[in-house]
Image (tube, rainbow, N blue to C red):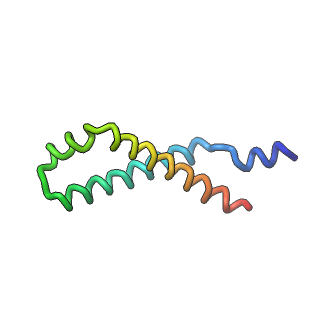
Amino acid sequence: MPHDAYAKFQFRFQDIIFGIILGCTVYMLEVAAYFMVTKKSLIVDIAFYFKGTLNFFIFLVSSGISVLEELVWRQALFF
């Protein structure tokens, strides 16, 4: 049935939330690695790092990729 095939790829709310949390965690690990490499003041670097819109765009992209990875991984179990 077409409905069953569609239901297989439905976005579940918990998958999206888990993907966003995973993306935020990965992004914060990247920020922590940046701090460890540069060894600058933490407060100044946080203000500088989040100042650019490019870094926020990277955050959104990494969160979206984590959501897609989680969805693909969960849906792959049902094939």
Percent coordinates x, y for residue 60 in the rendering: 43, 42
Residue at 32% x, 56% y: name it: 30
Q: Is residue 69 left or right of residue 4?
A: left
Residue at 32% x, 51% y: name it: 28
Of the 4 image quadrants, the one containing the C terminus is: bottom right
Task: Give the residue at the far left of this rendering.
Answer: 41
Percent coordinates x, y for residue 37 in the rendering: 20, 61
User: Is 76 drawn above or below residue 61 in the view shown?
Assistant: below
Residue at 57% x, 48% y: name it: 15
| Nearer to me, 70 or 30 | 30
Percent coordinates x, y for residue 41 in the rendering: 12, 50
How many labels were placed on the picture? 0
| Nearer to me, 11 or 61 | 61
Q: Is residue 4 left or right of residue 72?
A: right
Q: Is residue 18 left or right of residue 28?
A: right
Task: Give the residue at the far right of this rendering.
Answer: 1
